[in-house]
Image (spheres, grey):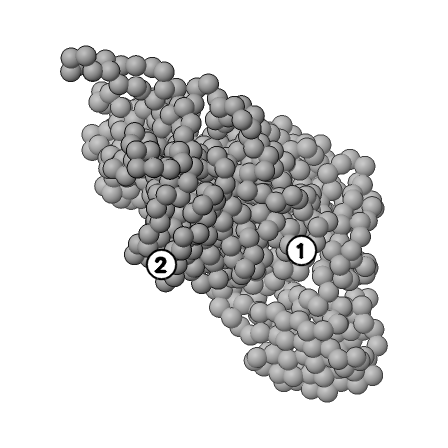
Amino acid sequence: MKFTEGYWEKNERANASYASQAFTAEAIPGGMRIVSPFRQITDRGGALDVGTITTEFTSARKDIISVRSYHYEGYVKGEPRYELNEDPQETEVEITEEEAVMKAGRMTVRVDLKDFKITYEADGKVLTNIGFRNLGYMQYDRAVLTKFPEPNYMAAQYQPYMVTELSLDPGECVYGLGERFTAFVKNGQVVDIWNEDGGTASQISYKNIPFYVTSKHYGVFVDHSDNVSFEVASEKVENVGFSVKGEEIRYHVIYGDDIKGVMETYTDLTGKPALPPSWSFGLWLSTSFTTNYDEETTNSFIQGMADRDIPLSVFHFDCFWMKEFHWCDFEWDSRIFPDVPAMMKRYKEKGLKVCVWINPYIAQGTAFFKEGMEKGYLLQRADGMGVKQIDNWQPGMGLVDFTNPGAVKWYQNKLKGLLDMGVDCFKTDFGERIPIDVKYYDGSDPVSMHNYYTYLYNKAVFSLLKEVKGEGEAILFARSATAGGQQFPVHWGGDCSATYASMAESLRGGLSFTLSGFSFWSHDMGGFEMTAAPDVYKRWLQFGLLSTHSRLHGSKSYRVPWLFDEEAVDVCRKFTKLKLRLLPYLYSMAVKSHRTGIPSMRAMIMEFTDDPAVKYLDMQYMLGDSILVAPIFNKESHVEYYLPKGKWTHLLSGEVKEGGRWYEETYDFFSLPVFVRENTLLSIGAVDTTVDYELEKDVQIQVYELNGTGSCEVVTNKGETAFVVNAAREESKLILETTKENPGMTYLLRNIHDVSAVTGGSVVKDTEDGMILAPEGCKMEVTI
């Protein structure tokens, strides 16, 4: 939110007061406190009739400086607070006449007591600072006066805001702030953290996260569930400004050796992602949204995929599994699905998991609504006149009040009935259309609850799934999110259109999302709105099946490949089977994400932080540590992509390219730029017909351009470590070693077709892709 007109002038609607000096500094338990008056105090009389901003510095966790600045200490807003995993660190405070310094591990905050300035440092390097007119208190729209009942007493009415502005260096780029479909680098943008249902083609976002990270390897998490407004080098081009309504502002400055390190620490604080089940990485197929479907239709889709040898893992029933005007009472439409248990049994026998669509809104006219109304489980009107109801999705719909423990249990019990029938997971749609003229059971501020509602909603559903299905089996397909929502994967990108432009904006949003602390992300392959041209559909299949999670879903038309053309069937088959073969690698990356919080799907800047060429790249990405993917976004099959320094091998063709440069090429629909980086040990599965296989059994370890050392962890489909493989090369000698003997495991020396000696194993055969070797124990030595 802008409070100035240019550098010098203030907005006429804002009575701005800025911290002008650090007048007092003192040590407090766990940190230090600075009191800053709104003007320079030069004598004792100057301390009269002046306001102050008090700033407290502590450390919530390792590599974090935590900051709270406030105007009025007694202000209570009633906002819900994020559930943070705090581990307060020991701090050292030293105060001299010149400065006040707090050290916490390798981080330091330094306050100049002569000329007001706050500097954040790490490892002796300056990260960012606050200076002249960068910390302020705004009385917005102050002009309105109200007469109070007391005689002759008038009071100014205004909205209070706290503002902080952190400096940016020349060339420093800002990323994140949620799933944003605007330009990938956020410099120059105004970003309001306010969840809305706006599709993928505007500045509006379903998933607003008050966290950003910069190319200087630090992040800032603004610890407010409220609408935080960011001015990212927009109001003042040298700063990232953020403001929040109220009398205080809280944030954390988070440091890392690189951007991945920042993500680890941020998710230490806000929560690590749960490990999705391995079956969720297969192909999901939906009924689509407003299409006509019954069991005959769904059977034809499932059988059609089987007849065309396209392995299917999950079948999703969208909204109309329930009767119209009955969303969401969680009752199957018996006119269309007369025998649900028998249907579920048939689907389970085909090896399928089942997902059904839900949301937190309940239409009037249903027994579920009446029960919720009578028990007080629905959000109430702010004026006290009963249940808050809206017509904009379902007639007279009410909203579940997830601040009420009874309402949570009531909602979960209804969902448990579906799980008992055989449903495996839920698509938790919506959660953004949350009104603010309501009253919550626990008295929470309704404006602050607007964004936080989705956290409580998805947590309630995910907790039930974890309780019923067990650890490692719970998964959602969620649309809305706020900070901490990464604990409840997976999220998808919302309502995109069936165009190349929308495909590109979806990827842009996904990369911003994963730079906001979320590890797993999906999107509607082929686009949600409209029906894609066959070429768009086939290119989107490639992109979608090389994302962490892959779902075919649409609005008014079906998304099965044979409705587009026969080549689409072949493309879908090829890339579905490729993903199944990649499952040991993909699941090892998921396990890593679960442990560390480093996303499985990541922007190039996250993996190659120090390569200046990748700062703005938003049309390619890394899938895990080792695979680079550059989707194709045009009818001409033309693509431009960048390979960072080193040797890169095309996953499909085996062609080796030198990195540190751009390439411009064309590809048919059965290929795209998908490259494996050097020194990679890539674990490849032995099965491409089902997602349900033992990942470690008969696994092949593909060795790519080893010129030093490499390693990989092979995991089971329960996320446990099966064994670790290490490799080293010294001149012509290659040493391959595992932590456990693995009968059936092989090595593929990619693009190597001649070996002169092998000990500890044997050559199986020389293939087009390279030599296949079989170890006889844990260690092999190969002379090339």
Query: x%, y% of residue 555?
Result: 56, 30
Residue that label 1 marks: 610
Q: Which amino acid does label 2 sit on?
A: Pro
**How many residues crowd around disc 1 within 10 Å: few (fewer than 14), some, or many (20 or more)?**
some
Query: x%, y% of residue 571?
Result: 71, 46
**How many residues crowd around disc 2 within 10 Å: few (fewer than 14), some, or many (20 or more)?**
some
Q: Is residue 405 left or right of residue 762?
A: left
Q: What element carries label 2?
A: loop
- Identify the image quadrant of residue 711: bottom right
Q: What element carries label 1?
A: loop
| Mark 2 and mark 1 residues within 8 Å of each other at the beta carbon | no
Decide which of 685, 59 is in the foreground and name it: 59
Res. 488 visible in picture: no
Residue that label 2 marks: 88
Query: x%, y% of residue 212?
Result: 52, 44
Image point 52% across, 67% down: which residue? Answer: 716
Q: How far apart are marks 2 and 1 (CA)?
A: 31 Å
Against 6, residue 35 (above or below) is below
Image point 34% across, 22% down: which residue? Answer: 158
